[in-house]
Image (cartoon, rainbow, N blue to C red):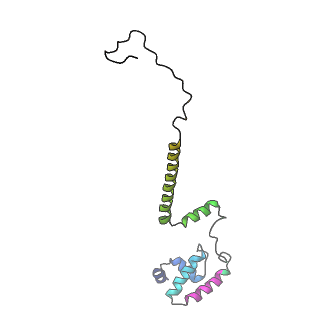
């Protein structure tokens, strides 16, 4: 038994349980099938025939008569989104997404620039009133000779 455990890398208590047909020590039927496949291969038995016989035997047990569920409950929207994101080839999608984002920024920038160019620069000004400059009180300097008079 120790030689079988050493060659197949199966723990000795699992080898003993397989030989006795005691499957309660295994967490799932996949482990039982894998260990029996390795053990049958070591003994040079017909592996598909042994696996079929094992499946028939496991089908009669209460614990392993059907495969365990892969998930605990119903999947929600987040699970569906994450599943779809996991299927994406990011080496292709990320550059394409970057190019699309760059194109969007360029189009929006061009539209903003065109809107700014077409806008009347004086449209924001209110009605203007002319107010002449107040002359400073007091004496003013005389004009230099030869300058035109107003």
Q: Residue furthest left?
A: 145
Quarter occupied by residue 125? top right
Q: In this view, does 30 lie above or below 90?
A: below
Residue 3 among those drawn in magenta: no
Q: What stretch is highlighted in magenta?
A: 44-58
Q: In this view, does 53 lie above or below 29?
A: below
Residue 47 among those drawn in magenta: yes
Residue 138 image position (x, y, % from top left): 41, 9
Q: Is residue 32 above or below residue 100?
A: below
Number of callouts: 0
Q: Which of 87 and 4 is in front in this view?
A: 87
Q: In which quarter of the image is the C terminus?
A: top left
Residue 107 image position (x, y, % from top left): 51, 53
Residue 12 located left or right of residue 51: left
Q: Which of 135 and 48 is in front in this view?
A: 135
Residue 41 located left or right of residue 140: right
Residue 139 image position (x, y, % from top left): 38, 9
Residue at image coords 58%, 62%:
82
Q: Which of 109 and 150 is in front in this view?
A: 150
Residue at image coords 62%, 63%:
80
């Amino acid at each position: 038994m120790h030689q079988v455990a050493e060659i197949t890398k199966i723990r000795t208590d699992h080898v003993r349980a397989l030989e006795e047909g005691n499957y309660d020590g295994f967490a799932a039927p996949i482990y039982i099938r894998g260990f029996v496949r390795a053990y049958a291969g070591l003994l040079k038995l017909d592996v598909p025939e042994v696996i079929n016989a094992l499946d028939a035997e496991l089908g009669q047990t209460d614990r392993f008569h059907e495969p365990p569920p892969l998930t605990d409950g119903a999947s929600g929207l987040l699970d569906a989104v994450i599943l779809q994101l996991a299927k994406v080839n990011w080496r292709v999608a990320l550059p394409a997404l970057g190019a699309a984002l760059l194109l969007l920024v360029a189009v929006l920038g061009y539209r903003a620039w065109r809107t700014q160019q077409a806008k009347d620069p004086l449209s924001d000004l209110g009605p203007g009133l002319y107010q002449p400059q107040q002359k400073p009180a007091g004496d003013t300097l005389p004009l230099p000779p030869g300058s035109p008079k107003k």
